[in-house]
Structures are given as structure tokens and as C-alpha cells.
Image (tube, rainbow, N blue to C red):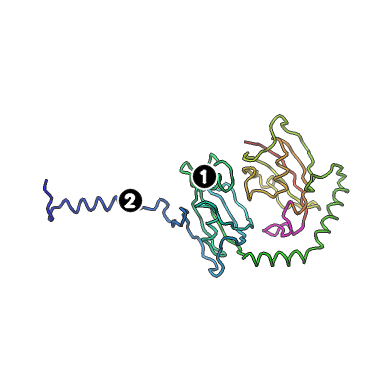
Amino acid sequence: MKITKNSSVLPFIFYLLSAALLFSCKDPYPGYTKADEGIYYKLLMVGEQDQCCHFGYYVTANIAYVTMDDSIFFSGIRKFKVSKPDFPGSIDKCFTLMCEHDSAQFIISALDFFEKTLENTVPDYLSADGKMKVSINLMDIQTPEEYEREKEAFLHWIEDLGEYEKVLLKQYIRDSEIEIPPMEDGIYYIVQQTGNNDSPVVATGDTVVIHYEGHFLNGKFFDSTRRRNDPLQFVYGQQWQVIGGLEKAIGKMHEGDKALVIIPSEQAFGADGSVEGIVPPFTPVVFEIELISVK
């Protein structure tokens, strides 16, 4: 068939080409904007635009890791330095797209996040398309200079508190009649119940499920998965999961073990205390841990 300028076939072909082009350019994640390095983001709340995040800044953020079908598999408040990434699409880039008090949700590569950032394997419960969501509420931003000034002033102010902590710990160990020596980092690890000693101890990359109760030296509780009836599951060795002293204790456990762990502040919430303000600075804590399962 010969096609002329007036043929009705031309508009039809143009329509097909336009539709194909529109379909091919359609955003795979409606409501999200594509950023550099292949990160998609959706701004949920606009904060203070005069203080925005850059690489090298320190942030305090409420972070949640979410599957593509909106199931949360980790959430917590963390303070850390935003490092310049060494690969495109790093989670660190997400923070540099935000300003103080912004809330946003990002879609990133789960493969890159687990294998490159956490140096671990991707959990089976994540999407087959290799994506995951990260929800971030950016609570506070500090420049490196602001962070160092605050840290120096704070440490001067509570210098004597560190010595007082040592006195309290010594009294607690004596009154509790604990006779075993501490580990090299000052942590006391006391076995309360032996589980399956034929199983290996927890190793990096294992998915562990634990119950814990955290309390101060005076016995007052500040956190308990048992009271919430909500055991904690996480991949051992990942960043931003549990405090250092708790991680070191779990690394000594077999499945089914129960232990009492006394943790000095430098292995717990440190000179800053917990971000939520529940645990004060230079405060030793006690955890009762049960390792329910190891996968």
C-alpha cells in the first residue's frame, strides 16, 4: 500500500510510536523522583532548608529499612558520620539529598546495601527485583566543626562522671558477689543457662533472634523485648543494629544460651548517652539475654 501525506495510517503510526515512547519512559516507582546514581526518593516532610547534609557531616536520624511491600525489618535512631561513598547508589548519598528535619523515603539497591555497605548477603525476605526502601527522618545535622566543639565541651563538663562510673561498677560487682574476671574491654559475661553447645557460636552474617531485658545498676528497666513480647531479629555483624557490648556478648553465645552481661558505658551508650535520652551519659548497663535461634 502506498502511503501519502493525507493517509490516515500516519496518525495511527504516530500514536503507536508515542504510546511506546511514553510506556518506555514511565517511571517504575510512581510518586518517587530519580536522583543521581540510580536512587529514587520521595520527600514526605520539608524541614529547615538552611542546614542541609553534606559528606563529612554528622547526622542523627530515625531510620527504617523496609521491604518493597512495606514490611519494616529494622528501625532505630542512630548518630553517625555521613561518609563519601565509594560506589554509586550508596545509602550515604540519600542523606545528602536531605536537610534538617526532612522526612523522606528512598528506594535503593538491596544488593549494593548488603554486599557493599554491610559486607553481607541479601536476606531472602527482600524483593526479587533487588530493591528495598529506606525511610529516614533527619533529626539533627552537625558540621564537623560543630560536632568537635560540642564533643569537647561535653567531655570537659562530665569529665568527673567517668570516674564516678568506675566507682559504681566496682560497688555493683562487689554487692552482686561476681567473682569472674571481666573481658578485656571491661564487659562481664556471666552464663545463666547453657543451650546447645554442639552448635557453633554466632558468627558474622548469621540471622539471630534474641530476647533481652536492659536495666540500670539500680535494677530499673529501660528496655525489654519480653515485656513487649517482641523478640529482636537482626543479621549479626551489621552496622546500627545493637550496641557494641551487646554484640560482643552475643558473639560468645550458642543457640539456647542465656547470659547476664554487665556493660560499661564505653561499650554501651558512651559519653553521649542514648539518642532518645533514656540512658544518660557514662552509664553502665546490664542486659539479660536469651539467644532464641540462629539461622
- As drawn, 44 above or below 252: below
Residue furthest front in the image: 86
View extreme (bottom): residue? 50
Q: Which image quadrant is residue 62 in? A: bottom right
Amino acid type, callout 2: Phe
Q: Nearer the viewer, residue 142 or 250?
A: 142
The x, y position of residue 74, in whole percent, is 59, 48
Mark 2, other Cα within 10 Å: few <14 / some 14–19 / many ≥20: few
- Magenta stretch in the rendered image: 267-282
Along the horizontal axis of the image, is 182 left or right of 22?
right
> Which residue corresponds to mark 2?
23
What residue is shown at x 65% (from left), y 67% (from top)?
Answer: 146
Q: For marks 2 and 1, give the CA distance.
A: 27 Å
Residue 269 place in picture, x, y as percent = 72, 55
Residue located 66% across and 44% down the image: 229
Q: Position of residue 191 (x, y in %)?
A: 78, 38
Q: Is 208 or 214 nearer to us in this picture?
A: 208
Residue found at the far top of this picture: 198
Q: Amino acid at mark 1?
A: Leu
- Mark 2 or mark 1: name the one nearer the start of the chain: 2
Whole-percent x and y of residue 239?
Answer: 63, 49
Foreground disc of the pair 2, 1:
1
Q: Which quarter of the figure is the N terminus placed in? A: top left
What is the number of the mark on residue 111? Answer: 1
> Where is the C terminus found, in terms of image quarters?
top right
Instruction: Report whether 160 appears left or right of 223.
Output: right
The secondary structure making up most of the magenta span is loop
